[in-house]
Image (cartoon, helix red, strand yellow):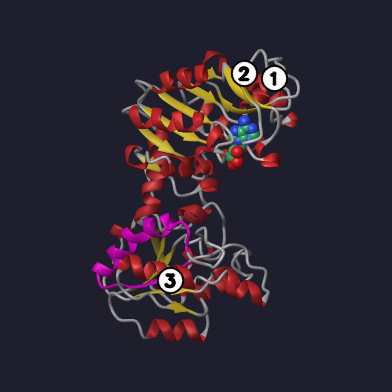
Amino acid sequence: MLNKKTIQDLDVAGKRVLVRVDFNVPQHEDGRVKDDRRIRAALPTIQYLRDRGARTILVSHLGRPKGSPEDAVKYSLRPVAEKLSELLGVMVPLVPDCIGPQADAAVSLMKPGDVVLLENVRFHPEETKNDPEFASKLASLAEVYINDAFGTAHRANASTEGVAHYLVSGVGFLMQKELEYLGSVLAEPKRPFVAILGGAKVSSKIGVVNNLLDKVDRLIIGGGMAYTFLKAQGKEIGKSLLDAESLDYCRDVLQRAGDKILLPVDVVVADGNPFDKGADGLATRVVSVDEIPADWEGVDIGPATREVFAKAVVGAGTVVWNGPMGIFEFPQFAVGTRAMAEALAQSGATTIVGGGDSAAAVDELGYADRITHISTGGGASLELLEGKEFPGVVALTDK
Ligand code: AMP
């Protein structure tokens, strides 16, 4: 159980409330917001505060600005303020600086129920250094601090961690939901508990495998990372993705996991990499994992594997999935990823999809409504699956 105050535990009525949100959203070339999921995900907290007559001061980062004049335009939150105004149905002004006289003035003019968005907090290098003086200036704008920036809570920055030391504080609705699903549910999962991991590199998922291995009843490994496991079993993997440095680790996991682990039994191989020459010009074949040809590369799980993996999800109590089953950016090689999304949607289990590629895949494929929880944070959800605590949550006021 979460031992931190939540927004509902705090007296916010009429107060100035600083809310760290994660509006680091993908944009079009011209700056327009391309994917507003993270903005929509923050609406329950903003609406709750408006309903109580709070003055809501939103703070977020966008990208990694380096300080050039071009970056001041490229990484401005202006398009986000416009999108948020549209979604909320009220005008949300963008305050040109997140601290200093302009911020003070804007906040002093706020009326109960008003919402403002402060300009990109990373325009100040002190943000990522978690500079205490900068954090205290941010804190001076408000009386209460709410952290609802799940996607950034694994970083100890001034607006995600430092600021919490100066104000009474708690988690917003989004953060609470993410922590409940990726934290508490995993602590006491309904069984059988199945984890599905995919994506590119074994090395980036070692912490996750270590944390989940003892907790799960089944560990399914697909996608690019499966090939290093197949190689560790002594199989030929041709030109498929190999994370050579993780080979010993994979041998060790295979031994520890015994028959808990499920690997592909067949794969789709191509005579080249789609990122090099596009997918259309490639020849493809379905082969058993014992017969991967020397010059070919595994790009998706095969039909028999789709069936084995889908069957393993039927009757599960809890399923957690992170990472695509193939090079899903190309529709030809998204078949395995799509099949897993469908298997989860039909499973009847509590289904949790970690952020990043698998969350995007579930959304694009239209299965979002049938998944219990889709995380809004890629790196952050992985860190929770690793069992880590977030500095941005640890610093909040205890219950
Ligand atoms: P990750 O960020 O580790 O979750 O990895 C996501 C990436 O893994 C996506 O860009 C996929 O294209 C890639 N991926 C999935 N399956 C494979 C594969 N068989 N070979 C190479 N890359 C893959």
> Is the residue indicated by label 3 positioned so its CB lies within 8 Å of ligand 1?
no
Closest to the camera, between mark 3 and mark 2, is 3
For the point 41% across and 37% down, which residue is it?
352
Badge 3 amino acid: Ala
Q: Is residue 70 above or below residue 168?
A: below
Q: Report the amino acid beneath label 2.
A: Leu
| Residue bearing mark 2 | 254
Between 4 and 51, which is closer to the camera in this rendering? 51
Q: Is residue 28 left or right of residue 314?
A: right
The Cα–Cα distance between marks 1 and 3, rounded to whole angstroms, is 50 Å
| Count of numbered marks | 3
Task: Examine the image and state in which quarter residue 311 appears.
Answer: top left
Residue 167's place in the image compared with 384, above or below, is below
Q: Quadrant of ligand 1?
A: top right
Q: Name the residue rendered at 34%, 20% in the picture.
A: 315
Give, as a single range, the part of the protein colored magenta: 33-59
Is 366 left or right of 75, judged from the image as shown? left
Residue drawn at x 53%, y 53% as measured from the top left: 391
Residue holding disc 1:
232
Q: Which mark is residue 81?
A: 3
Rendered location of residue 386, percent (x, y): 54, 38
Magenta-drawn stretch contains 57: yes
